[in-house]
Structures are given as C-alpha cells and as structure tokens.
Image (cartoon, helix red, strand yellow):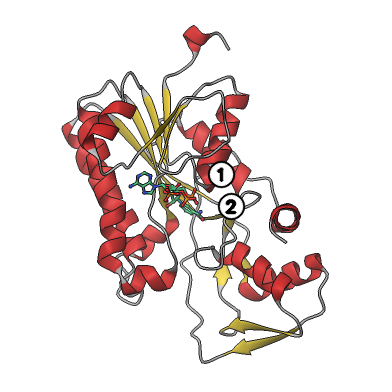
Amino acid sequence: MNPKTREKILIVGAGGFVGKVLTQSLVAEGQMPLLALRKKISDFPKLKKYHGDLEDPAFCNKILKNIETVFYLAAFKKNIRFHSEQPFETLAKNVKPFITFLEAAKKSKVKTIMYISSTNAEYALDPDSGIDGYVYGKFVNELIARAFVKETKIAIKILRSAAVYGPGDNFDPKTANFIPSMIRKVDETKGQLEVWGKGNRQLQFIYIHDLVKNIIAAKNSSDDFLTFGNPDIVSVNEVVDKIVKSIGKKLKISHDITKPDKSTKLSTFTNIVKPKTSIDQGLQETIDFYKNHHA
Ligand SMILES: NC(=O)c1ccc[n+]([C@@H]2O[C@H](COP(=O)([O-])OP(=O)(O)OC[C@H]3O[C@@H](n4cnc5c(N)ncnc54)[C@H](OP(=O)(O)O)[C@@H]3O)[C@@H](O)[C@H]2O)c1
C-alpha cells in the first residue's frame, strides 16, 4: 500500500488476544497501525509501539498524535469471581482508562473510535445477574461513549462481541474464558471431569478471525452500534463433549448440580461479514494451537 493512502490507525490494547489478530489483519491489508500496549511483546517488530498505562494522560496525548482512526480494545479482565468480589476495582480499571483516553482524544485529530464492547453489557441492568464490575464497566463505557459523541465531532462506534475464542487465546486457568479453560481442564484431567451445573446453559461464541473481519468492516459502516457473534447456539455439555472427543480423552463426565446453571440472554447479531467458522472447526483450530503452545 502506498504510504500516502495508509490510514493513521492506532490500536489500543494491541498486546491482547484480539489486538494481536487485529494488528496482523490490518498489516495484511497493507496498513501500518501504531500500537499502544502496556506489556512489552516481541511481535510486530516493524510497527511503532508505545508502552504505557492509559490512566496516564501524558501517555494518551502521546499515542494520539496525528491519529485519525482508533480501535480501542483495552479492558481490565480477570475472572467472574474477581469481577463479582471486587466490582468497584474492576469497574474503575475499565472506566478510568477510557475516560482518560477520551479526554485526550478531544484535543486530537481523531475522527472515529471503534470501542469494542461485549454482549455481556446486556446483563448490567438485569436484577438477577448480580454485580459484576466487568459487565458494569462495559455498560458504563458504552454510556460514556454516547455522551462523548454528543459533545464532540468524534464518532464512536460501539461494537459488542459475543465470547471470542481461537488460536492465541488466553489459557491461564486463573483468567481464561470458558472455552480455553475447558480445553486446559480436559487436557489435564484424568478419569472424571466435573462440569458445573447440569450443563444445559445455551451459549454463543465468535471465532477470532470472524470477529476481526467484522471489526475491520465496521470502520466503513454507517452504523454506530453493532453486535457481532455466530448465531449458532451450543450448550455447555455440547462444548465439553466436542472438546473431550477432539482431544481424544476417555473421561467420565459428572455434574455438580449444587452449582447453578446460569441462564444466558441469547443475542441477535448484526454482523457485517457472516461468520464462517463452525464451532467444530473453531474448536479444532483452538485445540491445535493449545497443543502446540501450552500442552
Ligand atoms: N475475549 C472475549 O471473549 C471478549 C468478548 C467480548 C468483548 N471483548 C472485548 O474485546 C476487547 C479485547 O479483548 P481481549 O480478549 O483481547 O482482551 P485482553 O487479551 O485482556 O486484552 C486487553 C488489553 O488491554 C490492556 N489494558 C487494560 N488496561 C490497560 C491500561 N490501563 N493501560 C494500558 N493497557 C491496558 C491489557 O494490557 P495488560 O496485558 O498489560 O493488562 C491487555 O493487553 C476488550 O475490550 C474486551 O472487553 C472480549
């Protein structure tokens, strides 16, 4: 791509699971995005990287210099237990960086910000869902984005995503999402595998590359609120069965019915690019990645 036609793109939270794949995809299109991250990574040696904390206004001013388009992917995520037991800390660590970043954006040349939210935001006002600082953080940041747009000439597109999975995912048992933590659990378990609840909870996911295609397509969409996910519905039990078969383990599955089967709000998706990766194919790719990098 001719450097003159390249967009001035910034990816915030570029060192995370989605950020790395988004960066790869934009580079494959000929873009040279600037990357803002906290931890040092060895990936993308040819791209300019800024390291710092988004709660630092000077850092936000620095990364926004001459930028027109932002993909804001930064989020503070641990696990549901932490989000529920320390909801204020979780909420603050999601909201403060976003506010600090937007304050800096006001003084910049930025035209569009893509804010990656979550279908989990739908639970924020549900009285049965309890207090979860991550869910609140996503919801509050959506409100902040809407308020910011009213007051400035900068557009913010809110892009809600279903649970994401795929190669490159986080398999740390302390912080991993359901699919990668179950892959690890199945791999490390001998004999009996315990599943919480009856396992009938219905779930929806999106494979990482299907999500990233939609995030990139959203840049040129006239919609400012989109929800991305694969509409296929799978139960907890189906996902567990598929993982056990794919890893090739003989395990006896038991259910701890003292643990509740949470209900899921199924989403209606407004994908721009139809997700093409089936759960079987996506799980296989994720398990292959796990075997090559973690097992
Ligand atoms: N993964 C999913 O299933 C899913 C589903 C729906 C929506 N989303 C949303 O999609 C986005 C990307 O998710 P992901 O899975 O890629 O998350 P991730 O791997 O946790 O990446 C988020 C990144 O944000 C960075 N970050 C957080 N607070 C920061 C701060 N104060 N200053 C600088 N950097 C900060 C983190 O840096 P450190 O590594 O240094 O902490 C991390 O690299 C997030 O907004 C998430 O909420 C994800």
Q: Residues within 10 Å of mark 1 (few under 14, many from 20)?
A: many
**SS at mark 2 in the image:** strand
- The x and y percentages for residue 99 are 23, 43
- Mark 2 within 8 Å of ligand 1, using the beta carbon: yes
**Residue under the point 75% across and 81% down:** 190
Q: How many marks?
A: 2
What residue is pinned by disc 2? 206
Q: Is residue 149 visible?
A: no
**Image position, residue 11 (x, y; %):** 44, 33
Under 8 Å from ligand 1: the CB of mark 1? no
**Mark 2 is on which residue type?**
Ile
Residue under pointer 1:
211
Residue 209 is at least partly visible in this image = yes
Rounded to the nearest angstrom, the CA distance separating label 1 from label 2 is: 6 Å
Residue at 54% x, 47% y: name it.
17
Q: Tag 1: residue type?
A: Leu
Q: Position of residue 138 (x, y in %)?
A: 34, 54
| Image quadrant where one finds the C terminus | bottom right
Looking at the picture, tell me which residue is in the foreground, 78 or 224: 78
Q: Quadrant of residue 28?
A: top right
Q: Which mark is residue 159?
A: none
- Left or right, residue 49 beside residue 136: right
Disc 2 residue crowd, few under 14, some 14–19, many 20+, Cα 10 Å: many
Residue 236 x %, y %:
62, 73
Q: Residue at point 57% right, 70% down?
A: 202
Most foreground residue, 35 or 99? 35
Q: Quadrant of the N terminus?
A: top right
**Residues at circles 1 and 2 in contact by the CB criterion of under 8 Å:** yes
Picture layout, residue 49 above or below residue 269: above
